[in-house]
């Protein structure tokens, strides 16, 4: 019976070396904007609970103040995802 050809395995070749990716740096506006939005949201909620009844524009919004405060905090968290 005839023999089939023998298969030769190719020599191992290591994968090509990756070049290190350059360090990504966030824009200058990201960190100050993030901190500002977080602080504004915190101050808005605290001001709603502490000064309730003494500030007219806060009383007009009622319970929407909590949503506005958390909106600022949420926006600050979304900006923080761009920070590197």
Image (spheres, rainbow, N blue to C red):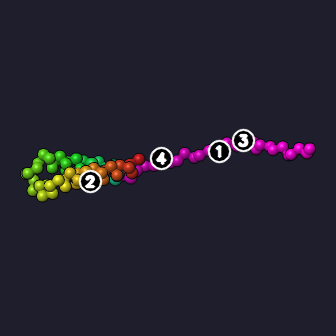
Of badges 1 and 2, nearer the viewer stands 2
3 and 2 marks in contact (CB < 8 Å): no
Residue annotated with mark 2: 71
Residue annotated with mark 3: 12
First in residue order: circle 1 vs circle 2: 1
In front here: 12 or 2?
Answer: 2
Check the image and name the residue furthest to the left. Answer: 54
In front here: 40 or 50?
Answer: 50
* 10 Å crowding of disc 1: few (<14), some (14-19), many (20+): few
Q: Which residues are magenta?
A: 1-28
* 10 Å crowding of disc 3: few (<14), some (14-19), many (20+): few
Residue 23: which numbered mark, if any?
4
4 and 1 marks in contact (CB < 8 Å): no
In front here: 43 or 58?
Answer: 58
Q: Is residue 57 above or below residue 80?
A: below
Residue 80 visible in the shown view: yes
């Amino acid at each position: 019976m005839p023999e089939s050809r023998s298969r030769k395995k190719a020599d191992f070749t290591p994968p090509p070396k990756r070049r290190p990716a350059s360090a990504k740096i966030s824009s200058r506006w990201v960190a100050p904007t993030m901190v500002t939005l977080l602080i504004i949201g915190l101050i808005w909620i605290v001001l709603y609970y502490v000064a309730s009844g003494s500030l007219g524009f806060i009383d007009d919004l009622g319970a929407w103040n909590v949503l506005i405060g958390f909106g600022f905090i949420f926006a600050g968290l979304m900006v923080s995802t761009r920070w590197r």
